[in-house]
Amino acid sequence: MDAFANSFYEFAAILGIAALVALVGRFLKQPLIVSFIAVGLIVGPYGIDLLESIEKIELFSEMGITVLLFVVGLKLDVTLIRSTGRVALFSGLGQVLFTSVFGYFIGIALGFEPVVSLYVAVALTFSSTIIIVKLLSDKKEIQSLHGQISIGFLIVQDIVVVLAMIVLTAMGTPTEYTVWEEIIVVVLKGFGLIVFILLLMRYVLPRVTSLMARTPELLILFAVAWAIGLAALSDFLDFSKEVGAFLGGISLSATPYREVISGRLNSLRDFLLLFFFIHLGSQVNVPLLGEQLIPGIILSLFVLIGNPIIVMIILGLMGYRKRTGFLAGLNVAQISEFSLILAALGLSLGQINEETLGLITLVGLFTIGISTYLIMYSHQIYEKIAPALSVFERKNPFKEVDEDTIKKSGFDVIIFGLGMYGNNIARSLEEKGYRVFGVDFDPRAVDRWKRKKRAAQYGDADDPELPEILPMDAQCVVSSLEDKQINLALIKYLKLADYKGHIAVTSYTGRTAKELEKAGADLVLLPFVDAAENIPDKLQSLKLTKPD
């Protein structure tokens, strides 16, 4: 039997096992990420040892990472990156500094040698871009304020990890350059890469994408080729592939085809990421894990608790609400795939042994597994512990609360969701003389609303504390959001805040509408039904003759 046939049968078996394990995981209410890592353990060398085509698995894994970061870049706005740059820099560097320093001293206290403690501390510093972005995407929170801040400090971490690997390599390998000379070279190469992409965005990509878009399949092929090509170029320049793929997505985000490309690539992204998590699970050296259990638990608790706390402190000092700090902080409560890469580098340089590699791997398993649940259920967790987090919020969280606007009060209607539907509702109300106040979880939507000289506030509809910072004397609250759970939460929190006005929410189905009415909605908007009922009146403008 030839090698190709063997690989084909191997992949068929892996995909079958993955489907079965994922199904069991669903029954146990576990996220797919945990299930796929479990598949890696099952098919890896300490399980049934099924992986023979490890190079192919790794290739698919890297392609999945590339497509994921490319899609994220597509959905980001360059102006938004500039607006969150300061908070991303301070929170990213602050968390890196805190974790490195305290992690080093914890390593020393556990009896590790200084070099081993340094490796452990640096490994604890980085959070998993892949896992965080995937979870935020699944929860549709990439565009939220805490999502954008998280993406920002993850980019800062990616830059730091490159510099850390340069420093650690320089410590163990003779080179003709000094550490500072190598850092300068990296900065220059990074600057050159960014300038190169900016020039292409200005003079080349608009024409190329317009030409490719005449055939949708060709546009998608170009997008994938562009993502992987820039990832390869970034890797060639000694940056991570993720950086290149992310910049590639940003470079196409200004084109009119971003949504088409993003929508077509989502399924490909999810399929390829399966191999990333399988590969991650298969790399675990199971026999070494038992020896490092106690140190692993101590270091895992440090990452799970310490990292979120430092992020909450930094964001609180910078004027963000405690909820934003908490949700963003949970996103750094795990270590990264880069941590394992860094540990493997240390092993290859002879600076750490297999026991240290096993310890870092164990911390990765603990923190990735636990933080996945923390991020998935972050809103429910926040609702339970919110009163205890007040210490992390300034008296005036000016970055999110526009007190001057809210104090004016006198608004007639508050609209949640400032997309197309919400905008149309607002325009119709304003034409009839009503004063409208807007709320959205996307900072860009809020900025667009304000540019139209309308009052607006950033906020999540399912935030239990949001009513405290809204003009609650409005006659009516209207939600243009279609998500049933968010609308149920909004109704609940408005009732708890003793809101006296009317509540109108949106539903696309009659079944959901009854549930919303039962929960306390005074009116349920049915966009499709309402539009259909207005169609006969519009058709009359065509002067159709009525049937006999």
Image (cartoon, rainbow, N blue to C red):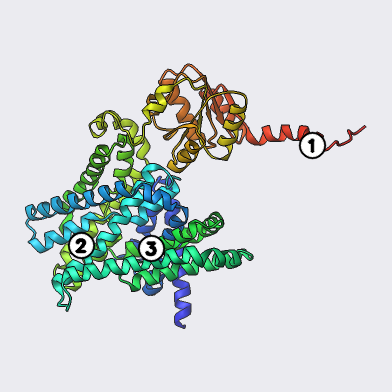
Q: In terms of image quadrants, where is residue 364?
A: bottom left
Image spot of residue 425 (x, y percent): 59, 32
Name which of mark 2 and mark 3 comes first in the sequence.
3
Confirm whether residue 201 shows in the render. Answer: yes
Q: Nearer the viewer, residue 45 or 436?
A: 436
Which residue is under mark 1? 539
Q: Residue at x 59, y 27 (%)?
A: 429
Looking at the rendered structure, the kind of residue marked 3 is: Phe
Q: Nearer the viewer, residue 522 or 41?
A: 522
Separation of disc 3 and disc 1 at Cα? 54 Å
| Element under disc 1 | helix
| Element under disc 2 | helix
Looking at the rendered structure, the kind of residue marked 2 is: Gly
Which residue is under mark 3? 276
Separation of disc 1 and disc 2 at Cα? 71 Å
Which residue is under mark 2? 358
Label 1 close to label 2 by CB (< 8 Å): no
